[in-house]
Amino acid sequence: MDADTALPSRAPTATTNERRSPRRPLSLAARAAIATSFVLAGFLGLVGLTLTQTNKARALRTLHDRLETFAIAYITNTDVNRYGKLLQPETSPNPNFSRPGSGLYAVALGDHGYRWESSSAIGRDFTFLKPLEPGQSQFVGPVDTRMGRLYYYSYGVALDTVDKKSVRLTVMVAQTEDQLEGESAVFRHTLVVWLSILGVMLIVLQLLLLRWSLTPLRKVASDMSRVERGDSEQLDSQYPLELTGLTERINAFITNEREQRTRYRHTLADLAHSLKTPLAVIRSQLESPTTGDEAARRSSVLDQVRRMNELVAYQLSRAATSGRQTFASAVPIAGHAEDLVQGLEKVYAAKNVLCEFDIEEGAVFYGEQGDLLELMGNLLENAFKWAGHRVLLVMKMQRQAGRQRPGLWLSVEDDGPGIAEDKIEKVLQRGVRGDERVQGHGIGLSIVQDIVHAYQGELVVDRSPEFGGARFSVSLPAS
């Protein structure tokens, strides 16, 4: 290929990121407005159709009565002479019968070939008209004729002569459909205009009501923006009852997230601060001149390493505490309690400790499973350490009106020596053991206290009324 030959350029292809993003769903206001418009249009359409049909039925009934009145008027004005001959009506009940092409016609048929037509019916074709028996009537229409579509009313009578003979007469009065349709068209036009005006007014009113109804949701969005900007700590406005549950859970979620972030920050700061002293001691031991007492130096370094291990374990447990969660799942308690006790009974088999359960059926813990295991595990292990032979674990649900999730009351009792009131606060401090002769790191109860605080609960230490030893009671609130 020659150097001067230009390669054909390719059109740039769209990457996955450049593809059109999914269409954003319609807003609640738009959805409600569209749905309302369709429903309103259907409703007004049905109303219009019903009124149109009702008006048509009324118009037909009015036409029937009108034509019947004209027919009776013509019958009343028709006489019979002494020879039985029918005499033409002298007057007409409506001037249109005298005006050709008026659309209002009258025709009479009688015995001996008698036929009479109003001036408006002259030259028209009424061959479809049939004589009726006396007393018989009919209202027919619309029928197709050469004059157009007609509605007509026919009535058959028998007129008596002087010598008591009867002469049959059938009177028909007809009207073209155009006159009826003209009246119906005016009614339909008026109805459409007013229904359209009513529909527009209802849509505007619905939009105003919708805007007013969605004001609390806009208020929630505005308050959320204030929280995101840092202008507010929580959603602090007054909301309707339907949104109270949602806003309370949002506030709980915000609070939990901030507490979790604060806990992580404090944990890292505490861990860094706590490790400074052990690290300084180890460094001092390692940098000091070598002496003959190598065993003492080794023991000092190992002691500081053990202390650092305890600090790391404590701070990691503290940081891992999830705390109270708005959307936490329910963790069954009974099975985990049995597993913990079985493990502790093996560890403290030499003491022959009997652990009794008083766990409410269906009792659950709303939070992380790890927090439940830490909470129960540390309290039970502390009870097994100090117990003589008996330990009691109690679990009760605490239901509260207006709350969807019940609270939890947990207590662990033992028959050990108990804790003096003046030493309770000291025992709950990190790294402090009730008796230095009992093996342990002294951080278990401190972890329990941190978990209880994270779940906004309360830890109470007193004397067991049944066993006489210590009783640790934890109360977690309903939510």
Image (cartoon, rainbow, N blue to C red):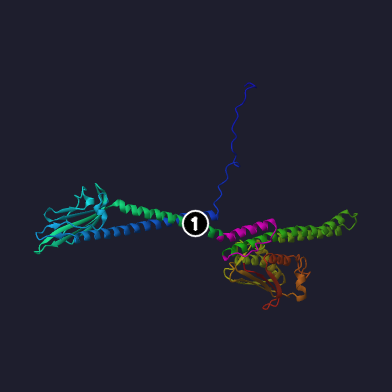
In the rendered image, is residue 195 in sight? yes
Quarter of the image where one finds residue 311: bottom right
As drawn, is 284 to the left or to the right of 383?
right
Name the residue furthest front. 90
In the rendered image, is residue 347 in sight? no
Tell me the residue that label 1 is attached to: 203
Which x, y percent locates residue 282?
84, 56
Please check the rendered image and state whether residue 220 is part of the magenta-colored stretch, yes or no: yes
As drawn, is 179 to the left or to the right of 311?
left
- Nearest to the observer: residue 412 or residue 36: 36
Name the residue furthest top. 2
Which x, y percent locates residue 427?
76, 70
- Nearest to the observer: residue 113 or residue 230: 113
* Magenta-colored segment: predominant secondary structure: helix
Quarter of the image where one finds residue 235: bottom right
Q: How many marks?
A: 1
Write down the region rendered in magenta: 212-241
Quarter of the image where one finds residue 55: bottom left
Q: How busy is the neighbourhood of tag 1: few (under 14 within 10 Å), some, or many (20 plus)?
A: some
- Nearest to the observer: residue 188 or residue 107: 107
Please check the rendered image and state whether residue 214 is part of the magenta-colored stretch, yes or no: yes
Which x, y percent locates residue 326?
62, 62
